Amino acid sequence: MPIQADEEIFATRYAHSDFDRYTLVNSRPAVEQFFRWKASMQARPKPVLVGMVLQAKSHGFQRRKYFQPRYPIESIPEDTLVHLRAVARSTFPQFTQLLDRSQRFSLLLDDELTPSEGTGYARTFSCRIVTVDGQPLSDNAPKRFCVKLFNDSAASIPSHTEYHSLTFWSQTFYTAEDMIHNEIGFTLEECGILIEYVTLSDTKLEEQSEVAQIAFIESARHALRVLQYADISQLDWSSEQWISTPSPCHTTSNSTLTCVLIDFALTAQGDRYKDGYKEDDYGGMADMLDEARIPADLIRKWFGPREEWDFFRASYVMEQSVR
């Protein structure tokens, strides 16, 4: 299978979607050339974006996904609904309708919230919306947002040499477009999405009081249950998939935290491939609590049992006690 010269590839390819997945799966020289291209992209200086005003298109990546569940989806348990109502954040219905009906909007990038090495699939910034369809915003709108700007060209991915076959390696090959479709929201033309700004707790989870840690564990379990009852599976569990934020009832004498799940770029809805393939989302969340250095005995006591139908078990912290 002939390949183009490196010079032509370097000059005409800007993202993963510019490469043909079939060719990458079936041609080792093409994969090796892909990694040479990636090295050249990673060597480029990361542009400074703070202070820039970006023009965005509303619903730029929107597409309808007609999901037909394999099994009947049950109602979310009442205690989880009670929790969701208790930790609900302020909403701006008029602004939401305005943005939903809009065609374009502009936003000003403030602080960058992601690590500076620039090897991820996206850079995240706090930002402010300047105009919607050319009109300035009223006061009845959030003051801050977050925006994720996707660019997979410099993203680090595993080497093909770590896998026995290119087919298995290809399962680590994602495109920015696919990630955006998973997270779908108000988008920017150059692959970005606008999301809510959530205030991060100033104190690390491991340094919180036991009361606050227990509140976060319980909140994390409720958040996980919402995903599970929607048949959504997180394929990339890490402690970067959540934000610990003070609960609405948080006071100096009543230290409570809420778990807000973020980053749905690598999620799947419905069973992947076949009935036998499952992700242990329950275990993944529990293990991430453990990675955040919350005491394991608190996790086992307060995280609660699995759902009756949740049969796949691959958790270190939760299964350790039954070995």
Image (tube, grey):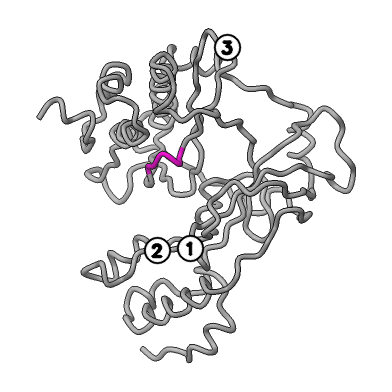
C-alpha gap between disc 1 and disc 3: 40 Å
Secondary structure of the residue carrying tag 1 is: loop
Q: Is residue 15 left or right of residue 48?
A: left
Q: Is residue 8 left or right of residue 268?
A: right
Does the stretch in magenta take in 107?
no
The image position of residue 32, as x and y in percent, is 37, 80
Which residue in the structure is indicated by mark 1? 155
Q: Badge 2: how crowded within 10 Å, few (<14), some, or many (20+)?
A: some
**Of residues 308 and 301, the one drawn nearer to the viewer in this rendering:** 301
C-alpha gap between disc 2 and disc 3: 43 Å
Q: Are marks 2 and 3 in contact (CB under 8 Å)?
A: no
Q: Amino acid at mark 2?
A: Ile
Residue extending furthest toward the top: 253
Q: Main secondary structure of the magenta part?
A: helix
Q: Name which residue lies at 35% across and 38% down.
A: 70
Mark with earlier residue (2, 3): 2
Query: The magenta stretch spans which residues?
Result: 237-241
The image position of residue 206, as x and y in percent, is 39, 28
Mark with earlier residue (1, 3): 1
Q: Badge 1: how crowded within 10 Å, few (<14), some, or many (20+)?
A: many
Question: Where is 164 relative to 2, above or below?
Answer: above
Which residue in the structure is indicated by mark 3? 251
Rendered-image quadrant of the C terminus: top left
Q: Residue 157, which numbered label?
A: 2
Q: Amino acid at mark 1?
A: Ala
Q: Are marks 1 and 3 in contact (CB under 8 Å)?
A: no
